[in-house]
Amino acid sequence: MWPVLALLFLAADDGRGDADRLFASGRYDEAANAYVRLLETSPNDLGLLEHAGNSYLAQNRPTLAIPFFKRALALSPNDLDAARQLATAFSAINEFGEAQSLLAHVAQLDPADAVTWFRLGVLMYMRGAYPSAVEDLDRALALGFAGHGLSGRDSAQYQNRAEVVRAVAQVEMGRPAEAAKELPKLMARPENAGDLTLRFSWVELLYDAGRYQEAIQQVDIALASSPENSSAHFWRARILSQQQKVPEAIAEAEKARDLSPESPGPRGLLVRLYQKVGQAADAGREAEWLRAHEAAAPEPAQ
Amino acid sequence: MKGPDEALASLVLLAVFAPSAGAQIRFQDITRKAGLHFVLHNGAAGAFHQIELMPGGVAALDFNNDGCTDLFFANGGTSPSLQKNSPAFWNRLYRNNCDGTFTDVTEKAGVAGAGFSNGVAAADYDNDGFTDLFVTGVNGNILYHNRGDGTFEDVTRKAGLAGVDPPGKTWAIAAGWFDADNDGFLDLVVTYYVEWNAATERSCGTGSTRTYCHPSQYAGLPNRIFRNNHDGTFSDMTAKSGIGAAIGKGMGLAFADFDGDGLMDIFIANDTLPNFLFHNLGGFRFRETGIEMGVALPESGRPVAFMGADFRDFDNDGWPDLVVTGMVNDSYQLFRNLGRLAGFEDFTAKGGLAAATRRLTGWAAAFFDFDNDGWKDLFFANAHFPELGSLLGTPAPLPNSLFRNTGGRFEDISTAAGPDFQGAAFYRGAAFADFDNDGKVDVIVTAIGSEARLFRNVTPTTNHWLAFRLRGTKSNRDGIGARIRVTLPSGKTLFNHATTSVGYASSSEPLVRFGLGVEDRAKAVEITWPSGTVQRLMDVAGGRVVAVREP
């Protein structure tokens, strides 16, 4: 009898340890399988459920992760880790409403957790709810990221990203004055030098304010590091168009179109620009493309 | 290098063309004092039917020809059963008593209506001298003929405008009157939104939280155009005209002759789809040119939720421009007309609207010169969708917006427009007229679930003004479509045209107004009637409404 029991315990221990080792070594597929096998005998083991979910999340298979986190939360509704991870999984499949509910729940249970407010802020930014995003990120920044079990480096990264997303959200929600104070400082940080979202946000602000020369300088900085970036060429085309530099704007819009043929923005601008210079046939061709594109494009989902 | 005379001339020119000293535009809410107590009801009862989002048209019209502008409000109904089963859902007609007050004459006039109404278009379609009404709605529209004795007759069926399609295909939002073929009688355009059927409408939302569905959940519809047969009836020209070939999700509409060929063209704002600009080719044929002309999409190339529109010249270059409201995160769009078929440029950022309107959701939009300085300003009726407020973290009801035209660019002056102007609500339609005949344009705005507000223009200004009440003879009697060019003694020229189709599902006074700034008269006035007749008036004193009969 004893040897059999010993084997069983040994098997259980070994199985969990093996799964953990697989996960730690980045073999997430095998780790997931191992955790799922273990769950057959221990279906209500909170740790196993979360490990299984995390293994699928690590493989970027959020739909497979969701049932495990849901089971974990059903067993332990106040399990903050499970709720956070489930929110991550829902975010990954664009179920932002579900993710928001979960993170709000976590924030309610642990209001001093800056990381949760940060994640909620980023989520709200992704949903286009910029005022909420700014509010949540303000809260995260006020709490500060140090002392939340994060390394000094991680904490600094969270701080930086929170400031970046907040500044970009301020541009998007039409608060240029606040954003204008933050953006140059953020772009001056070495870690943000290659952040094109941040730079284009600054470009947008300058463009809206009619500061075209400064805007084009920023686009040129982006192009120096990413010469094949379609958005950068499109921004350049828009700015040149506003400056009435039509041939140059056409050249840039054509570049943007060629680099990103499925993007409607450069095509729409080209219709206008070609018409300005009397290239009716070219304008007609781009208009035709846009019509076909609009007819085929699925409308945004609910 | 300029010589001294040339430099002086430039300075003088600059002084003349610069906006006159800026009086702060201010509005005062006189709703109660005026005796108005119209509440727009959408019948919402927690089931989130899409129709509940869209009502709110209002018309400013002089139905009894007493020179004082009256009001007609389109009202919703029960949802989803589409009934006006209580007076709360009635459409309402208020007579302007010419003393600053209004009297509800709905019952006497016989215009309480039926069903679930959305919008209204007012004009004299039979040239009998009395303004008629067309009321749009879900699964049914109504044409009211003004009998001229204070009452109206429902002539929808008689006119051939009833039952053009089965229910589910006839959710009309806005309508507008214009003379498509310049034959002297007004034709009718009706915008249609989406196929809607309560029985098959899906539920939307997250978990147990229900919300209104995104427009993508509904199939779009073609708009419709009806030709006036000169005998009180209309012919459906939707298919033959080319209008019906374009499927959209039609919202606001506006008319202008954008290419100067003497034929009025049609702009229709589409929700989440590219806008339509129907170029009038003559012979009751239209070609949809929104993309070619650059007004279908914003510069990003991504269609947004376009709502209301106005189509007038804001930069005094003689070419009608376009403004279109949209949804939060997508700025309201300003499209500047570059001239005869040269297309439009996206002037949103340059015009000062990009950042300033990005946080707003807008319905009605209109260009009117509220301070009479010679530059048309902008008014927007605002409100987020109800459930959007909690997502955005901001209240869903919004105050309206006012942008002053500072000479071809706009400046947001909403917060300085007076305390009454700061009130938030679920605003929708708006109509514009000088209700108290003081020469300044006032605004009436509807709001779902609360009282429509009458904002009296109390701008402290001594700027001069001039308005024209047109009477067509060969042209349609209201002169709709007439283009007017006013030349001031300084040489400055101003442009406007006659239209009642302004904003969102609404109808404004047919008068054509001009702010003259510091100049008290027009040196010359040129009216190009829809018939092609060009009429010239010389040395016209300002500060009055000039009645002009087509020669």
Image: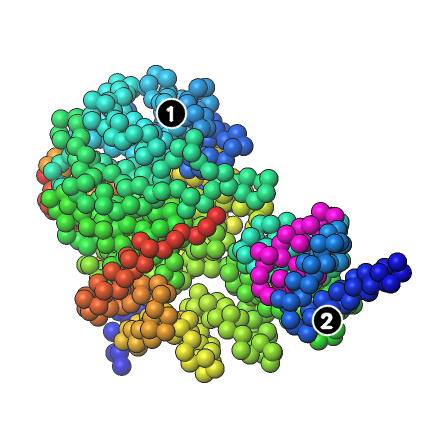
Using a 10 Å C-alpha cutoff, classify the residue at mark 1 as few (fewer than 14 neighbours), some (14 to 19) or many (20 or more). many
Residue B242: name its quadrant.
Answer: top left
Residue A68 is one of the magenta-drawn residues? yes
Residue furthest right as drawn? A2
The front one of A65 and B75 is A65
Q: Mark 1: which amino acid?
A: Gly
Res. B224 visible in picture: yes
Q: Would you name the residue on which mark 1 appears? A: B115
Q: Quadrant of the C terminus of chain B?
A: top left
Q: Element under label 1?
A: loop
Please identify the residue farthest to the top as the structure is shown: B108
The residue that label 2 is drawn on is A21
Q: CA distance from mark 1 to mark 2?
A: 69 Å
Residue that lies at the very extreme toward the bottom in this rendered image: A224
Residue B259 sits above or below residue A165 on the image: above
**Do the residues marked 1 and 2 share a common chain?**
no
Report if the CB atoms under discs 1 and 2 are less than 8 Å apart. no
Look at the image and say whether residue A275 sits in the magenta stretch: no
Residue drawn at point x = 23 percent, y = 64 percent: A285
Report the residue at 35% width, 65% height from top.
A262
Circle 2: is it few (<14), some (14-19), or many (20+) Cα within 10 Å? some
- Range of the magenta residues? A50-75
Circle 2 marks a residue in which chain? Answer: A
Which quadrant is home to the N terminus of chain B? bottom left
| Coloring scheme used | rainbow
Q: Secondary structure at mark 2?
A: helix
Q: Residue at x 31, y 65 (%)?
A: A267
Mark 2 belongs to which amino acid? Arg
- Place of residue B56 in the rendered image (x, y in percent of width and height, measured from the top left): 41, 35
Q: Is residue B241 above or below residue A180?
A: above
